[in-house]
Amino acid sequence: MNGEERERDERDPFMTSTAPHALVVGGTRGIGRAVVRRLAADGHVVSIIGRSQAAANDDRRVRSWSADIADLSLLKATLSEIVQAQGPLSAAVLLQRYRGGGDDWAGEIATSLTATRELVEWAGEHFEDLGSGKAIVVVSSIASGYVASEQPVSYHMAKAALSQMVRYYAVSLGRKGIRINAVCPGTIVKEESQRFYSEHPEIEALYREIVPLGRMGTSEDVADLSAFLLGPRASFLTGQNIVLDGGVSLQSHESLSRRISGAGTQ
C-alpha cells in the first residue's frame, strides 16, 4: 500500500483501495436516489453531486456535494474534491437534466449536453480500474426517440443528442477500457410521484392494461439496470441505448387502440 492509499484508509475504513467508487450526478431524489441506494448496497463507495445537498445518510460510504454542474469550473473543482476525499472513481451514473426557470433550450444544452461531455471526458482521463472495470451509465429517456408531448422540444433535443454522444464515447473511450451505455426509461413511478398515482388509480390501471409486463416501471428498475451496466457481467456491452418500458413501445398503436377500446379487428 502506498502513502496515498494508507492516508485514505486512515481517514475512513470503508475507503479501501479496492472498493469500487461510483459518482452519481443527480442522486439526491427520484431515480438518482434509488441508484445511490442500490450501488451502496452492492458495496460501492458513492459520491453524489446534486443541485441541493442530499438528505442525511447513515451509510458512511455515501457522501454528497452540492454544485451547479453547468458551471464547468465549479464542476471540475468538485470532482477534484471528491477524489481527494473518497479516492479514485471507476464508475458514474449521470441523471442530470435542466430544471431551471430560464431559457430551457440553453439550459438543456448546458446541463444535459455540455456538462455530460465534461464529465465523460474527465472520466476518460481520471477513472481507475478498481477491480470491476470502468463504466458510465447515462440515464436518458424514451423521448430520445419518441415524442413526449408534456415535455418541451429542448428536452427531446437533449435526449436524442445523448444517444449519439453515448455511441461516440463508446468508440473513443473503448481503448481506455471505459464502457458507456444509456438507459432510456418510459414512465417511472418515483417516491415523489407515488401519491399522485395512488390518487389516480385509473392511470395505473391503464398502464397495467397497455404494458406487456402488466405494471408501471419503478425507480428501482432503473437502478437495477444501471448497476448491472456498471458491473463485470456487462463487460462486453458498450454504446447501447436500452429502452426500459416493460415492452409498451413494441406494440402497434392500431392494435393497442383496438384492444383497449374493445373495437376488435376488421
Image (spheres, helix red, strand yellow):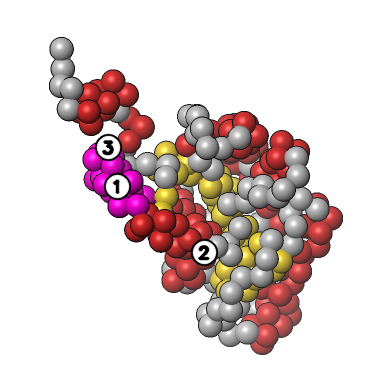
61 lies above or below 28:
below
* Image quadrant in which the C terminus is located: top left
- Residue at left 71%, top 75%? 85
Query: Looking at the picture, how far across and down is residue 194, in whole percent?
Result: 40, 59
100 lies above or below 129:
above
Instruction: State the residue position of label 3.
Output: 210
Can residue 74 be seen? Answer: yes
Q: Is residue 4 left or right of residue 142?
A: right
Can residue 83 be seen? Answer: no
Residues in magenta? Answer: 200-218
171 lies above or below 120:
above
Circle nearer the N terminus (1, 3) = 1
* Image quadrant in which the N terminus is located: bottom right
Q: Indicate which disc residue 202 carries.
A: 1
The type of residue carrying mark 3 is Ile
Q: Indicate which disc residue 33 carries.
A: 2
Q: Are marks 1 and 3 in contact (CB under 8 Å)?
A: no
Task: Sort mark 3 into few (<14), some (14-19) or many (20+) by Cα contacts within 10 Å.
Answer: many
Residue with the most extreme top position? 266
- Residue at left 69%, top 68%? 65
Query: Looking at the picture, how far across and down is residue 58, in whole percent?
Result: 53, 82
Q: Is residue 218 left or right of residue 46?
A: left
Distance between mark 3 and mark 2 Cα atoms: 28 Å
The type of residue carrying mark 2 is Arg
Q: Is residue 87 left or right of residue 92?
A: right
